Image (spheres, grey):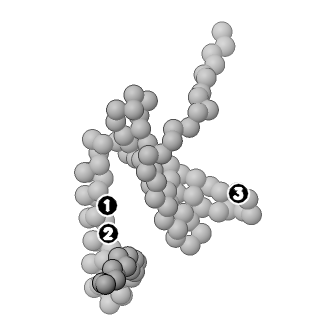
Amino acid sequence: METSTIQSTEKKEEVFSRRVRAGKRTYFFDVKATKSEKDFYITITESKKIAEDEFKKHKIFLYKEDFEKFADALAEAVDFVHDELGKQGIAVSTPAEEAPVSEPALEQA
């Protein structure tokens, strides 16, 4: 007996997306709605260019019950790297903050 699996080709639309370019790699942080559209989850995708028109992708699905544990572990790992580099006298580069957008001055009559 042959068993087949039907996979939906319909992609969930992101309700939020943030792209981070990092050299040959690009990271995507996407928030998507669940099938019921009453909850959300995050996908983190690493995309690395390996040829002219070819990319290698790795994806992590992160569910709300794990957000805090994931964020804590990531912060702890980042702090460890910063501390270790600091001990070695290596400056840790941080991304430049975007300049705040100022409101145009109102002309007074």
Q: Which residue is mark 2?
A: 78
Q: Which residue is mark 1?
A: 74
Dots 2 and 1: beta carbons under 8 Å? yes
Q: CA distance from mark 3 to mark 1?
A: 29 Å
Q: Secondary structure at mark 3?
A: strand
**x 57%, y 58%: residue:** 47
Q: CA distance from mark 2 to mark 1?
A: 6 Å
Reply above or below: 74 against 93: above
- Farthest residue toward the bottom? 89
Q: Is residue 43 visible?
A: no
Reply above or below: 87 against 21: below
**x 72%, y 62%: residue:** 51
Quadrant containing the N terminus is top right
Q: On the rendered structure, is 109 left or right of 35? A: left
Q: Which residue is mark 3?
A: 54
Can you give x and y, in whole percent of width and height, for residue 9 in the image? 62, 32
Residue type, numbered disc 3: Glu
Reply above or below: 43 against 103: above
Determine the image quadrant of residue 86.
Answer: bottom left
Q: Which mark is residue 83?
A: none
Reply above or below: 96 against 20: below
Residue type, numbered disc 1: Leu
Q: Secondary structure at mark 2?
A: helix
Foreground residue among 86 and 95: 95
Residue type, numbered disc 2: Val
- Farthest residue toward the top? 1
Q: CA distance from mark 2 to mark 3?
A: 30 Å
